């Protein structure tokens, strides 16, 4: 079961943490996790990590910085779904005018705007947890 709540502009500072914005919090398979965003020398970074933030690594943490927004650029990141060895979460930033992203021929995911006043650039983000056996023939091929 997936429980999620979108938060507006929460940020944290710490001696070893970058300033980051919590985009959403979740619990899957009994594991608490969040999708965080921050700016680094490599550009915009998105990271799936534990409730303590980006630099507190879990063996299931994933993330990326400096996303390429070109059509062939792979404007996403992905990793293991927290608490599930064989499940995958994919996510990424989008331009401000992109309200959806197609992750399979028949699977469209809505995007969410970055919180205003958070220090993040204007834009949106998306995430999708691949269900077991996804994609089926009915879902279409992965994009």
Image (cartoon, grey):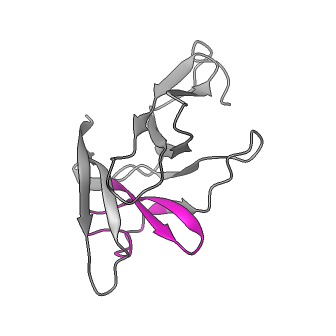
Tag count in the figure?
Answer: 0
- Queried whether the magenta region covers residue 10, the answer comes back as no
Please state the horizontal and vertical placement of residue 65, each as a whole percent of the image: 57, 63
Can you name the residue that lies furthest to the top here? 138
Please state the horizontal and vertical placement of residue 107, each as a whole percent of the image: 54, 21
Residue drawn at point x = 52 percent, y = 22 percent: 108
* Residue 6 placement, left or right of 99: left
Can you name the residue that lies furthest to the right here? 72
* Residue 86 placement, left or right of 7: right
* Residue 43 placement, left or right of 85: right
Tell me where the magenta segment starts and ends, as one range: 34-62
Image quarter for residue 142? top right
Residue drawn at point x = 34 percent, y = 85 percent: 16
Residue drawn at point x = 74 percent, y = 44 percent: 70
- Queried whether the magenta region covers residue 56, the answer comes back as yes
- The quarter in which the C terminus is drawn is top right
Please state the horizontal and vertical placement of residue 33, each as a whole percent of the image: 29, 55
Q: Between residues 94 and 4, which one lies in front from this camera angle? A: 94
Q: Between residues 72 and 28, which one lies in front from this camera angle? A: 72
The answer to whether residue 139 is above or below residue 80 is above
Residue drawn at point x = 51 percent, y = 37 percent: 96
- The quarter in which the N terminus is drawn is top left
The answer to whether residue 35 is above or below residue 98 is below
The answer to whether residue 12 is above or below residue 36 is below
């Amino acid at each position: 079961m997936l429980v999620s709540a979108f938060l507006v502009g929460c940020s944290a500072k710490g001696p070893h943490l970058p300033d980051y914005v919590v985009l959403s919090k979740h619990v899957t398979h009994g594991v608490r996790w969040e999708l965080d965003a921050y700016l680094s020398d490599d550009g915009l970074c998105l990271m799936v990590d534990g409730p303590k933030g980006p630099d507190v690594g879990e063996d299931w943490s994933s993330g990326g910085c400096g996303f390429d927004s070109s059509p062939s650029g792979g404007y996403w990141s992905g990793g293991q779904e927290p608490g599930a060895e064989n499940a995958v979460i994919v996510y990424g930033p989008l331009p401000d005018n992109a309200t959806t992203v197609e992750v399979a021929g028949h699977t469209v995911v809505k995007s969410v705007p970055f919180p205003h006043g958070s220090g993040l650039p204007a834009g949106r983000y998306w995430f999708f947890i691949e269900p077991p056996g996804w994609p089926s023939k009915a879902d279409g091929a992965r994009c």
